[in-house]
Image: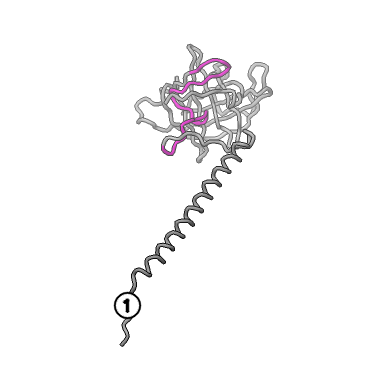
Amino acid sequence: MQVVAFDAAQRWPHSATMLLILFVIVAVLGGAAVVGLAANERRRKALPSGNRPKALPAAVGNVLAERGLREMRTGDVLTIDGRDFLCEGVLNYDEDGHRWVCGRVVDGSDARWMLVGIERSGSNSARMLEHDESISISGYPAETLLVGDAKFVLDKRGTATVKMDGDVGSLGDLRKDRMERHAERCRWWLYNAPGDESVLVEQFGSDYRALRGKKVGLTTVELMPGS
């Protein structure tokens, strides 16, 4: 029988050559990737500013750090026409999954209501309203309301549940002897008149209240989150 001896000296040079070739391939591929990234960065910087990718808003966990009027909360500050209003209380409405908000905003003795999101379709406006005691509602509201020289026509109506937070003025009496975050039932009627004027009539229990004011653009109101 012929015995063939294994010559390790002949095998190792071949293995070293293969390792060297693999190292060269990896180095070439890595260099190409770095060059490609650098080229992409140069092209991105060369784009006009309007075409550059926009940075995503900062986030805390899964919640965006910035909030808008639709997420108004007690303690927020709203700047309107150069005036700062503190949001002292908020009404959160829910009508079959459609949600909107109405905040009681105060500047000294001037208390108003900022109504946002009552329209089901997308709207870029809110309503700055004041409690109008001259509008007397004693029964089911009519299709039209005459307030002074203005004629307000019913636009929409519905029924929602309302959760109250903070100081909501006289509506706070509804929460006496109730559990925290208790939901009240509210029937509402929204009227419009020329000149972007609106009247919101709400019924809580047997009591009615009427709020009157005008539409304001969402972009004209600056919100500074209180928390």
Relative image position of residue 104 (x, y in whole percent): 48, 22
Q: Which residue is mark 1?
A: 5
Assign the N terminus to one quadrant of the image: bottom left
The reply to whether the magenta stretch includes residue 30 is no
Q: Residue at x 56, y 29 (%)?
A: 140
- Establish if 67 lies above or below 81: below
- Residue 43: name its quadrant: top right
User: Which image quadrant: the C terminus?
Assistant: top left
The single residue placed furthest to the top in the displayed view is 109
Residue shown at 68% from the left, 17% from the top: 149
Please name whichever residue, 16 or 55, is drawn nearer the observer in this view of the structure. Answer: 16
> Which residue type carries mark 1?
Ala
Q: Is residue 162 left or right of residue 2?
A: right
Residue 62 is inside the magenta segment = yes
Q: Report x, y in % for residue 60.
A: 42, 35
Please, which colouring scheme is shown? one colour
- Residue at screen point 35% across, 68% down: 9
Per the image, label 1 sits on a secondary structure element best described as loop
148 lies left or right of 200: right
Residue displayed at 58% across by 37% down: 120
12 lies above or below 95: below
On the image, the x and y values in percent for residue 93 come to 49, 33
Residue 76 percent coordinates (x, y): 46, 23
Q: Residues within 10 Å of mark 1 (few under 14, many from 20)?
A: few
Residue in the foreground of this view, choosing between 90 and 37? 37
Of 155 and 221, nearer the camera is 221
Residue bounds of the magenta highlight: 61-85
